[in-house]
Image: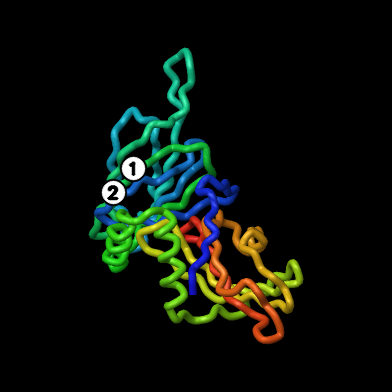
Amino acid sequence: MKLKLFAMSLFLLCTNAYTVNIMPEVRTTVSVSQADINRISCESGLISSIDYASNTGLTHKTHKNKKNVVILFKQLDDGRTRKIINAKINMLIGCGNEYYPLILDPQKIDSQSIFLQTSSLESEARKNNQENTVKTHEEVLIDLIKSSRKKISGVMKNQPSVYFDNLQVKLLNKQNIYGTNYQVNKFVVIGNNVTLIEKQFLNTQLSKYPIVAISLDDFHLNNDKNWTYLYLIVENWGAQ
């Protein structure tokens, strides 16, 4: 089967807060809100240290449980003008037995939740990162769809169906792609005597996160086969 992929612009905006998952010892650039409070959570242990340069306008406060820290950018005031923070800041966080080097990139976006993940996922994340560096963006998305088709995953229970365009669409499962900001959501689409196109699934009921790619197994549903699988790649690794 020739794989058809409908890729969306990476510049789609989302009004919801994002979650970003970070691996240890991998320097990662993370877009954070320059105006709202951002949260960093240590998933496997306690936060032991937070290091970054002074006079950057960045402030932080660690929760008493030492599992979470909030960061906030202040506006710099030289007495004449107030400067909005927009320069990238290097940060090193000790979490559990690991260190997480981050590059915080302040943007005019909503608040971010950053999760410092366990090292058990590190090898898979490194493998994906290494493979993806030699691929084009479209090749990465196509390979994600291909691997999702081959992978046998459990079916999520009690998922409500969404109805539109004389179709019934139901979420089957979600697959986080470690080392990327992507998640593959697999749906079953049911209809009869209809022709499908990818664009009709740009539906906010199917994902509250930016959709970067869409793929269908079949484009024609009839009496012989009235269902097919739909794959959405969303640009949020921590989406639930």
* Closer to the camera in the image, 184 or 227: 227
Q: Mark 1 or 2 closer to N-term?
A: 2
* Closer to the camera in the image, 110 or 50: 110
Q: Position of residue 83 (x, y in %)?
A: 46, 23
Q: Quadrant of residue 137?
A: bottom left
Residue at image location 71% in from the left, 77% down from the top: 191
Residue most extreme to the top: 80
Residue at image location 33% in from the left, 49% down from the top: 28
Residue most extreme to the right: 166
Q: Secondary structure at mark 1?
A: strand
Query: Is residue 163 shown left or right of residue 179?
Result: right
Q: Position of residue 223 (x, y in %)?
A: 71, 85
Residue most extreme to the front: 2
Q: Which mark is residue 80?
A: none
Q: Position of residue 100 (x, y in %)?
A: 28, 51
* Closer to the camera in the image, 57 or 164: 164
| Callout 1 crowding tier (Cα within 10 Å): few <14, some 14–19, many ≥20 | some
Q: Which residue is mark 1?
A: 103
Count of labels in the image: 2
Tag 2: residue type?
Arg
Labels 1 & 2 near each other (Cβ < 8 A):
yes
Query: Is residue 200 shown left or right of residue 78?
Result: right
| Callout 2 crowding tier (Cα within 10 Å): few <14, some 14–19, many ≥20 | some
Tag 1: residue type?
Ile
Residue at image location 58% in from the left, 80% down from the top: 157
Q: CA distance from mark 1 to mark 2?
A: 7 Å
Q: Secondary structure at mark 2?
A: loop
* Closer to the camera in the image, 66 or 106: 106
Q: Which residue is mark 2?
A: 27
Q: Position of residue 19 (x, y in %)?
A: 47, 55
